[in-house]
Image (cartoon, rainbow, N blue to C red):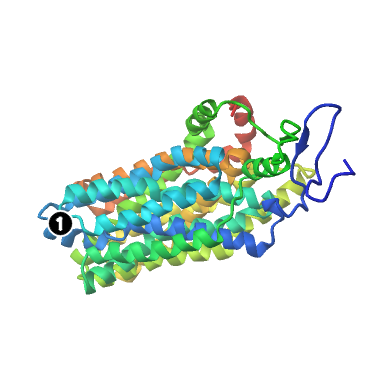
Amino acid sequence: MSGHDERSPLLQENGQEPEIIDFSKEDQGNPRAWPRSKKLTNIAVIAMMSILSPLASSMFTPGIQQIADDLGTTTHSVIGATTGFTIMLGFGPLVLAPLSETFGRRRLYMVCFTIFTLLQIPTALSPNVETLVAIRTLSGAFGSIGIANGGGTISDMFEPHERAGIFGWYLLGPLLGPTIGPLFGGIIVHRLNWRWMFWVLAIVCSINTLAGFFFLRETYAPVLLAARKREFENDGEHHGKYRYAGQDDRPLTSKLASSLTRPVRIFVQPIVLTMSFYQALVFGTTYSLYTNFQAIYNGIYGFNTEQVGLLYLFPGVGFLIAVRLLVPRIDNVYNALTRRNKGEATPEFRLPLANIGAILIPLSLFWFAWTVEFQVPWPATIVSTLFYGIGQVMIVNCVQNYYIDSFEKYAASAIAAGAVFRSVVGGVTPMFAPLIFEALGYGWGISVFAFLSVAIAPAPLVFYYFGASIRKRFHIEL
């Protein structure tokens, strides 16, 4: 309609039908039309949430022995605190992601991360291992909010052709957090004691929570459009005159029931199931290696706790190389394939560069396994983890972008569907990894993970060629 005021550029009227409120591309209320600085400020706050919770999952790895001695328990029991935290990093998004698609992103971010921040205090004061495990498990659920909704928030703000590069920097959080956690943890444990790890976390998380209150903005379009609708109707004379695009008039209980089952319905789709297993294998392998760095480099090479912590920088450097040099090429490949396909994009165009990871992950694992087994000089062992880091970024980034493009409106639920399996495997596997390494040695023990990664390596190539027909055959009504 041309006669409406500037607040409602897209109100459309059809006879007596309600007028439809929607965003235009130029509408400043549309998150995709926000200034880039505003978008990046939002992402900075969310990325910090996504760094801090995975960082907390691995930060006390160098202090496992000190914690066990202080609390009068075994190291195996202390590892259980990491397992509980990591598993809840996966289960949390199953609830938090669909809730954000009902109540909006910002409200969930602020409530959950505030609770996560406060839970660091009783963690630091834990009098026994049972309390430590219980509070860590609970904090993992609330800390998962950045992982649960980050992909959805990026989908809210960025068009598909520009999304992968931005998503790569955000995804550094879930990847870099577990990597730099042991570095900071090692320094704190070596110079202070293990409880200070959680006091430091509480301080840093508090700063990020305050930043969220001041700078984080709502991005979920249905919530923003609902607010605009209320603004138009607030005089009481226009009730029922407006509807917003995608308005869901079902009772709240029905909407919640549908939302909370959505990740499960997405997860059983064959492509999501397979690629979730791939991510789970990568994360299970990563946590198994990280939790055994202390045993390997202290036991074999004589490093102290602080020196072991510094070794985690090597996969971190791999992450940065991948995000800076390779991840932006995901958009380039996607756009080139779209042009070749007469301007028609498909989610499968996100997958070609995942093959870099499919090759680098098994190669780097075999490299690490047998250089450690034969106790070659330590630089030759740790350099392999740089290439492992590159491979990890390429697999996770391509898969997450594939999920976002396949389930755009429900991107948060799609990512949550994969996150739960990934985090459960990532949390449980380190419990058994030491037994595998003890029985088989580091050479064959780590090679078990390498052989599994070889077995699943063809998946990105298979889904690139056949993914569209599989998605059509197993269409999900959301």
Q: Is residue 437 left or right of residue 140?
A: left
Q: Which residue is most to the right?
A: 2
Q: Position of residue 381 (x, y in %)?
A: 33, 65
Q: Is residue 173 left or right of residue 21?
A: left
* Badge 1 element: helix
The quadrant holding residue 295 is bottom left
Task: Using a 10 Å C-alpha cutoff, classify the residue at mark 1 as few (fewer than 14 neighbours), some (14 to 19) or many (20 or more).
Answer: some
Depth check: give the residue in front, 82 or 141: 141
Residue at the disc numbered 1: 68
Q: Position of residue 330 (x, y in %)?
A: 62, 54
Is residue 306 in sight in this rendering? yes
Q: Which residue is most to the left?
A: 72
Q: Quadrant of the C terminus?
A: top right
Q: Is residue 67 left or right of residue 96?
A: left
Q: Position of residue 401 (x, y in %)?
A: 58, 47
Query: What's the amino acid at mark 1?
Result: Ala
